[in-house]
Image (spheres, rainbow, N blue to C red):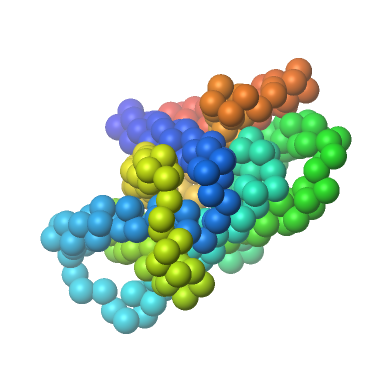
Amino acid sequence: MQASSYRLTGVLLALLGVVTFSFRPVLIKLAYGYVRDPITLIALRMAFSLPFFLAAALWSGRGGHGRMLSLRELLVVFGLGALGYYLASTLDFLGLQYVTAGVGRLLLFAYPTIVMLLSAVFFKKPIRKRDVAALGITYAGVALVLAEAVGGANLDLPLGVALGFGSALAYAIYLVIGAEVAQRIGAIRFAALAISAACLCCILQFLLLRPLSALALPSQVYGLMVIVAAVCTVIPVFLTAEALRRIGANQVAMIGAVGPISAIVFGGIVLGESMSRIQLAGAALVIIGVLLATVETRAAKARS
């Protein structure tokens, strides 16, 4: 029973992290209404996030995982942060210039399949038949929703799709390797150090590519980026890190199926992005696929 409760907490943490994270593309699309400069926006997001992660890194170093990290461990953590949050976030911000918030989140959802393949190849983790069935159902739902966008007149859609998939690939690698690293040095410490490195990369990118005058933005943009930093970056990063420790990369990836649905809902409510019957049908399939994966895992653990 205790093991079951431990995993259930991990599932709930992952679910909450996915929902808060999925509100991010909606806020970014709102910010694009004032300034269409992803380099500046992502620098603001990371600059507002950095103090929280530096504080968390200092605090976590005092706990049970407070040993000094080796140079190799630090390089791995910083590299994962640059890959999973700097590169993935930059590609995501760029892609959202060409696709809607809901479609952008759906493209990022390509990462569960990549996570499973990478886990199987590098860590010899088995892919169960139920996982394959769950992925088939969820991706059928994704295909239905994406078909709506393909049927439009957006000539930049292929570029947006390519950027979104690149973001998914970078994030999948972060999840797979990060799950192993977090087990060794602590989930909170790992997340704090990794994203601190990503924040520094984003700020440096801005300083190299933009003049300081680019920061002369409307107050609304700063307000939106503060919300993106606190609610859609800091909170989901720590929730996901703890969920990774409790239930592993594969299950966190499967629960991520909820993200596209919540992004579509938020996009419809906040941005007025249309939700057709086909999109609703696709949303239902995604939810069914997530339940097929997560409920079965909990039941199997209970039987054992």
Residue 284 in picture, x, y percent from top left:
67, 22
Residue 279 in picture, x, y percent from top left:
73, 25
- Residue sitting nearer the eye, 131 or 288: 288
For image coordinates 47% across by 75% down, the residue present is 208
Quadrant where the N terminus sits is: top left
Occupied quadrant, residue 128:
top right
Question: Residue 121, relative to residue 35: is it above or below?
Answer: below
Residue 14 visible in rendering: no
For image coordinates 54% across by 64% down, the residue present is 87
Horizontal side, residue 301 vs residue 35: left or right: left
Furthest toward the bottom, the residue is 71
Question: Residue 110, relative to residue 67: is it above or below?
Answer: above
Residue 301 in picture, x, y percent from top left:
45, 34
For image coordinates 83% across by 36% down, the residue present is 152
Furthest toward the top, the residue is 277
Question: Residue 185, relative to residue 56: is it above or below?
Answer: below
Residue 58 in picture, x, y percent from top left:
18, 61
Count all numbered tags in the image, as a single digit. Answer: 0
Residue 206 visible in rendering: yes
Horizontal side, residue 200 vs residue 134: left or right: left
For image coordinates 26% across by 74% down, the residue present is 69
Horizontal side, residue 62 vs residue 180: left or right: left
- Residue sitting nearer the eye, 281 or 73: 281
- Residue sitting nearer the eye, 142 or 272: 272
Occupied quadrant, residue 240:
top left
Horizontal side, residue 166 vs residue 249: left or right: right
Question: Residue 132, relative to residue 269: is it above or below?
Answer: below
Quadrant where the C terminus sits is: top left
